[in-house]
Image (spheres, grey):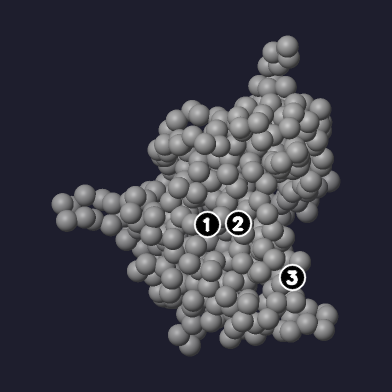
Amino acid sequence: MTPAPAARRPQDGLAWHEQLSVSVPLWTRLPDETAIKRICRNHLIRLYRDNDVDTACTVSFFASDAFNKFYLATTKHRKGLMRVSLPVYPAHKTRGEVATLRWVRKNSSIPVPRVLAFDDTNSNELGFEWILTEFMPGEPAERVWWTMSRERKEALVRRLASYQAELARAATTQAFDTIGTLIAVDCIKEFPARSWTPLKVRFDRLVAPEVFLGSRLKLKGPRGPYRSSQEWFTGTLSMIIQVQNNIIGQTTGDRKFDRLCAETTRTIAEKLLRVLPKVFPGHDLQTDTHGHNTAEQTYLHHDNLNLQNILLDEKGAVSGILNWEFVSALPLWTSARLPQFLRDNQGWAEVNYNRTVETPEYKNRAMTRSTKAMPSMTLRKESLLKVYMYEAVLSCASWWFLEGICRWADAIEAGTVIKDGTVQSWMEF
């Protein structure tokens, strides 16, 4: 019989390495593969009661990312993927992802991993939070992107746009009007393969790196759920200002550059706070026919849709969409932002190889297709301005972007951010 685990601190196993504006998570101890094997075997055997699973179970390291380590659990007939997570946001991150995956499976046709079991505490033999899911078939799109024809790429963009539209329609049906992360009302932690488990969710605090990196969980201030974009960004910027104030207060004489970075970042964050009402002018909170305030419409927005998180089958069809750990209900205007694989160098910018250069016009067509799929959403100037503010808030703590963000905020204040009928991004300043 496995002894009861000793009580641990909520963030036991996690340390942060701070360098300028970057907080890098570190593992102070590694997950025990013997414990992982025992957990996976016990759940796989119990969940599949049809004798289809051999009692033998092997576990091997599969992959890792900034906050997680993945292990492939293999039995005779089945595969499962266990993700062991650093306690960057104890309980909330795991609960949020499990509820989100369950909600997406129930309310859309998007192929996402089925959650088999999870533990949102570290009070277990592993000492970390974990999620066990079915293993998704397919290979990452990044392995085949450069060999895909333009027609296949466009078909992939259309498919992803249709998924986004499904999420928006489902959110509209269920009257999503809050910015935050979903959590399930029930406390079920294991989901048998042949049982029907009802799902009721509610909005909880927002789980996102900008609210937990480094020492931010110790800071005071609202963490959601939020009722408007302005409330959301006010909370995020206020947290950034607190972080910079702490750096300034703790900086010694031999770290003048760190102090300069913090003072500059604080100035930019304060400037963004001042111009928020110009970008989100009071209409965030609408008034219904009875004169009551109602919040803006939201939907589940996957903001980490890179080619590695898109799985394709042998025919090029989407077989899986991965990495839902920070997917939350965000305002509908965020749909005007291109998916990550259309924003960066993964598929569309010029590269130093003999590959087809994807033109800006092609990106615009893809963006138009994506946005047309959304209900009551067009590429309006105000939506793009909001998107650029979102990106500026996320980037204002990075030293490399401060000058452009500062000039962009000045342009908003001066009313010159729209040039020749086009909303300019802070990256253009």
Which residue is labeled 3 in the image? 144
Q: Residue furthest front?
A: 51
Mark 2 vs 1, N-terminal side: 1
Q: Closer to the camera, 168 or 86?
A: 168
Q: Amino acid at mark 2?
A: Ile
- Which residue is at a point 61% across and 63% down the rendered structure image? 318
Amino acid, disc 3: Val
Q: Residue at x 43, y 33 (%)?
A: 185
Query: In the rendered image, which residue does mark 1 sit on?
Result: 110
Q: Quadrant of residue 316?
A: bottom right
Q: For residue 122, what is the image quadrant? A: top right
Q: Decide which of tag 3 and tag 2 comes sooner along the chain.
A: 3
**Quadrant containing the N terminus in the rendered view:** top right
Q: Position of residue 272 (x, y in %)?
A: 52, 60
- The residue shown at (37%, 51%) is 176
Q: Is 41 placed above or below 287 here?
A: above
Q: Is residue 294 left or right of residue 108?
A: left
For mark 1, give the secondary structure.
loop
Q: Badge 3 local density, few (<14 within 10 Å), some, or many (20+)?
A: few
